[in-house]
Amino acid sequence: MDAFVRGPHDSLLPVTDDRGAWGRGRCGRPWPERARDVPVRDLRSTAIDAVVLQRPEELELVERWTGRRPGSDLPAVFVEHNAPRGSAAWSRHPLAERYDIPIVHVTHFNALMWDCGAAPTRVIEHGVPDPGHLYSGELPRAAVVINEPVRRWRTVGADLLPRFAAAVPLDVYGMGTSGLGRVDFVRSAPAEPDRPDTAPHDFRVHGDLDTSSLHKAMARRRLYLHSTRWTSLGIALVEAMMLGMPIVAAATTAAPHSVPEDAGVVSADLDALVTAATRLAADPALAYEAGAAARDHALAHFGLDRFLADWDALWDSVAPRPRVSEPAPTPVSTGGDR
């Protein structure tokens, strides 16, 4: 969303009275004025050119809120942010039978693994605003960004963190990370409630920071560690590359496609990953060189201009622009995670 709302279109963000999960609006984010809140009660009388869906439940929600059916009465696309859950080879997408709503995947890996049936599909890879080459790497530590690591556990590789922390000091950021300090890493289950909020080795939990503060904190660390086993490509990994950080990443899902060889190490060999993290932490010059390569790659492949151009091309096919001097299509998003 942070990238999407920076395009040339007006983005209408539904707002419910409780500003809950189905209608949060802008939430005070510093987005362009083209992204504006619209009370749900006003949607039926609001001109809408297209709708962005991000959860299957929003099919019914949009019809109830707007009085128009997505796909038939109102052009729509469905952004699938996630890799399939369960057995990937047999995961049928909820919109697989919808011929009138394109499914937009955020990675080619996800597009390969989801069974989308005959539904039209498109891949639009992540795009992020350039935070600048902020990397200093002055602290010989590794930055890790994971949301809800205790709940998601092996999915995000939280069980691997002590192995890395035994070799390289770790700083962990993200939502729901405070619980990591109360986890028994041996049994992979929550430990006693009175266990101190510390973890084995040099392992520090910093919690959820705003984007600017997070970028500044990450850029001071020597390297970025991407431990996830099975998620879609994390925005934080792309942002780390933009910052100029070298990458050590598990060779899972879209990471091998997204991190070039000279930007760090991508491997399914845990020993190789630990060795790479140790070497980068000990060699500032090597880390800086790899980080510069990571940034060059990220600017070329995950830049905002490419991302917005891909979306414009999609809108031209889904909701063509008027041929006369009329307002451009106005996509509306029903929310979703960053």
Image (spheres, grey):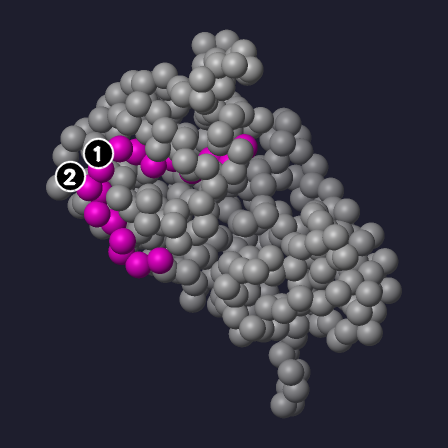
Relative to residue 164, is residue 266 depicted above or below?
Answer: below
Q: Residue at x 30, y 23 (%)?
A: 202
- Secondary structure type for disc 1: strand
Res 94 → quadrant:
top right
Distance between mark 2 and mark 1 Cα atoms: 8 Å
- Secondary structure type for disc 2: helix
Q: Please state if 296 lies on the left or on the right of 158 as rendered.
A: left
Number of residues whose C-alpha sits closer than 10 Å to that of mark 1, classed few (under 14), some (14–19) or many (20 or more): some
Q: Residue at x 71, y 61 (%)?
A: 14
Residue 314 appears in view:
yes
Q: Earlier in the sequence, mark 2 or mark 1?
A: 1
Q: Amino acid at mark 1?
A: Pro
Q: Residue at x 86, y 64 (%)?
A: 67
**Magenta span contains residue 147:** yes
Disc assigned to residue 284:
2
* Magenta segment boundaries in residue numbering: 131-148
Number of residues whose C-alpha sits closer than 10 Å to that of mark 2, classed few (under 14), some (14–19) or many (20 or more): some
**Magenta span contains residue 34:** no
Disc assigned to residue 140:
1
* Quadrant position of the N terminus in the picture: bottom right
Determine whether label 2 and label 1 are within 8 Å by CB: yes
Residue toward you, 91 or 296 = 296
